[in-house]
Image (spheres, helix red, strand yellow):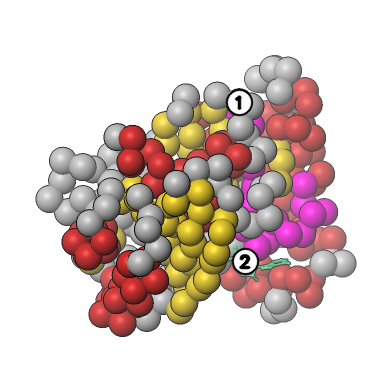
Amino acid sequence: MLFGALEAGGTKMVLAIGNENGEILEQTSIPTEDPSVTIPKIITYFKDKKIEALGIGSFGPIDLDKASKTYGYITSTPKLAWANYDIVGNIQKELNIPVGFDTDVNASALGEATWGSTKDVASSIYITIGTGIGVGVYQNGSLLHGMLHPEAGHILLSKHPEDHFEGVCPYHPNCMEGLASGPSIEKRWGKKAYELKDQTEVWEMEAFYIAQGLVSYIFTLSPHRIVLGGGVMHQEQLFPLIRQKVKELINGYVCTSQLNDMDHYIVPASLMDNQGIMGCIQLAKNELQA
Ligand code: ADP
Ligand code: ZN
């Protein structure tokens, strides 16, 4: 059985066809232009592929409330051509198949939970540290939506005493995305993040911020395992630094077998950067069964 997968990003759209085992049979990407240009290309790609359902993991904020009049819309995005745009409706009316819809990070959380490094645990979170920071939350077979959906990349952090950088988030002077995203690293240190590999102070500070976020998620959501993905996490030296800082910040207050085995508690994404698109395949499968 074939499924369509669409990872809708602010700069590019990844389109793929996969089967029920999460195997990607073909994949392509196109730049994200105005919906009037991009949506017809997406429809043309999927139209004759004999897919049973489509899963979309989208940038946001998006409306995930099926009882809402604007369900399936991208809502208040700063990417203005896409603000208040009915992405699900406009695709569904042309393809006439079930369309599953969730945030891009929830799709990645689902991909890892279905086929990747969290498939053996009941609850997990997936955090992307890239152009932005986002968190997907998976618990007992479901993805957390709540009122809107979590925007846990914008939680507020304590500043590092030696950090005089003002952050890159236009909304919050000291949120995690503003202080620890790829663009924040590049603006603070004046170089591309991958060019800073050997500067230990860069990654000490990065781990200081990421660990604060993780400890908040551990205390509030109590996940059985945490997956860290996104471009910045290709700096593998971050993992031991983050694990150590998380231990320090928890300071012995929560004691579980999982936290005693940090190397298997805080782990990298395991699906070769296909966790998002594979999660979209699972969103499609779930929608077909709904
Ligand atoms: P996006 O978040 O746009 O989907 P990515 O997850 O690739 O895409 O994130 C892009 C960000 O990650 C950029 O700010 C970039 O500098 C940073 N980045 C990408 N690759 C690396 C790397 N190898 N090391 C450090 N930072 C990286
Ligand atoms: Zn913010």
* The C terminus sits in image quarter: top left
Kind of residue at disc 1:
Val
Magenta region includes residue 151? no
Tally of numbered tags: 2
- SS type, badge 2: helix
Marks 2 and 1, Cα distance to the nearest angstrom? 29 Å
Q: Where is residue 68 in the image (x, y as percent from the top left)?
A: 15, 46
Query: Can the viewer see residue 178?
Result: no
**Mark 2 or mark 1, which has the lower sequence index?**
1
Q: Is residue 157 above or below residue 253?
A: below
Amino acid type indicated by mark 2: Gly
Location of residue 245 by image quarter: top right
What range is drawn magenta here?
Answer: 223-239
Determine the secondary structure under disc 1. loop
Report the front residue among 279 and 96.
96
Is 230 in the magenta? Answer: yes
What x and y, as percent, mark residue 164?
64, 65
Badge 2 local density, few (<14 within 10 Å), some, or many (20+)?
Answer: many
Ligand 1 found in image quarter: bottom right
Which residue lies at the image location 41% right of the left edge and 76% below the top edge?
32
Which picture quadrant has residue 253? top right
Which residue matches tag 2? 182
Q: Position of residue 137 (x, y in %)?
A: 48, 38
Farthest right residue?
198
Q: Residue 240 location, x and y as percent?
A: 81, 44
Q: Mark 1 points at which residue?
A: 121
Q: Ligand 1 near label 2 (Cβ, under 8 Å)?
A: yes
Left or right of residue 5, residue 193 in this image = right
Residue drawn at 46 percent across, 65 percent down: 15
